[in-house]
Amino acid sequence: MEVAKPFEVNTSAQPYHVLVATQGSTYKDTVVQLIIEKLRENPVYIKVVDVSALPDLTEEGWAAMVILHTWEYSKPQPNARAFVDDVRSKEKLIVLSTSGEGTYTLKEVDGISSASQLSDASEKAEEITKRIKQLLTKNKSIMETKVKYDVKKISWPEKTFVTKRETVAFDSLSNFFTKNYDAIYENLQKAGIQPSDPPCAIYYKIDEEKKETELAAAVPVQGKVPDIKGFGKLTIPPSTVITTTYYGPYDDGMRPAYAAMEEYLNENKLTRELMIEEYLSDPMIEKDTSKWQTNIYFIVK
């Protein structure tokens, strides 16, 4: 099976993001191109990758995830199989499985089967596009629901964090957080230091064009903290912040909360210096993403 050439359609500034993971073949290439033709004029950013790139991607930020893969020796493509297993919001998945018999599908999702006949490429593309648009409509409905975000201005005491600061691609954020939170907590435990508050992310810069952000995984601590090799320390002095609370997964559903924060900034003629997210829920314990609580803070002046 050939490797599919990666490419993007529209910019990531579009409100809805669709991931398409495929394999190189005349049939799959045709289906993908037909899908793009049907979606191109919509406010959608489309990222097309080969299925071999799936281990480096997560479900966060995608309104819909489309996977086109071939079953070989009665088994699904391994990367496709692993990605589907890892996705929590399986309702966002649209999986087209091709095989000689044209009957194989992944049972965990509402899959589509095909025998890779070019004569049915248009029909399959239409079915996939229909499902994508249904997910986009659902996503739009969620985003446009008038949630009342209570933005408050408060005083923050001095806070010290143990941090790992890097520039990270948007689609690598989940792996970055998992790796570095685990490492920070392990090192704090070895040093006999207890975290004082839930883990945070401190955002310094966001580059939509390059699809990357400069940020730090940060764990708050109190008292004297020794130097920890490979990690930094950041002390934020007493500050004025504005804050609101968001409940839900770490995806485009957060946009209305941030919009409320930006509106408060503009109305009160404030300038944002740092942006901080505080994560009060552990996804390994709380499986219901609608209950994940994130406190959002803007340090302002």
Image (cartoon, grey):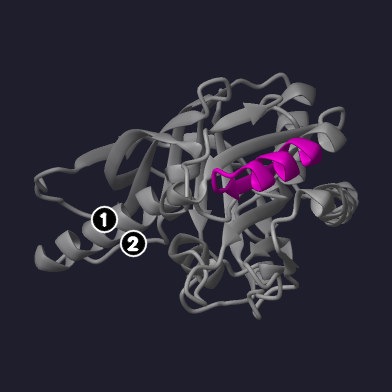
Q: Position of residue 172 (x, y in %)?
A: 43, 44
Q: Nearer the viewer, residue 214 or 264?
A: 214
Region rendered in magenta:
18-35
- In primary-sequence order, the first of circles 2 and 1 is 2
Q: Which mark is residue 222?
A: 1
Q: Splitting the image into 4 quarters, where does residue 230 fall? A: top left
Which residue is located at x 60 percent, y 54 percent?
250
Q: Nearer the viewer, residue 35 or 115?
A: 115
Which residue is located at x 71 percent, y 33 percent?
45
Q: Is residue 146 left or right of residue 255?
A: right
Asked if residue 179 is positioned above or below residue 46 in the image, the reply reads below
Mark 2–mark 1 Cα distance, whole angstroms, equals 6 Å
Determine crowd level at label 2: few under 14, some 14-19, many 20+ residues with C-alpha closer than 10 A: some
Q: Position of residue 162 (x, y in %)?
A: 25, 48
Q: Splitting the image into 4 quarters, where does residue 78 fall? A: bottom left
Residue 72 sits inside the magenta stretch:
no
Which residue is located at x 71 percent, y 75 percent?
103
Quarter of the picture holding the C terminus: top right
Q: Splitting the image into 4 quarters, where does residue 26 fall? A: top right
Do callouts 2 and 1 mark residues in contact (Cβ within 8 Å)? yes
Q: Which mark is residue 196?
A: 2
Q: Nearer the viewer, residue 285 or 30?
A: 30
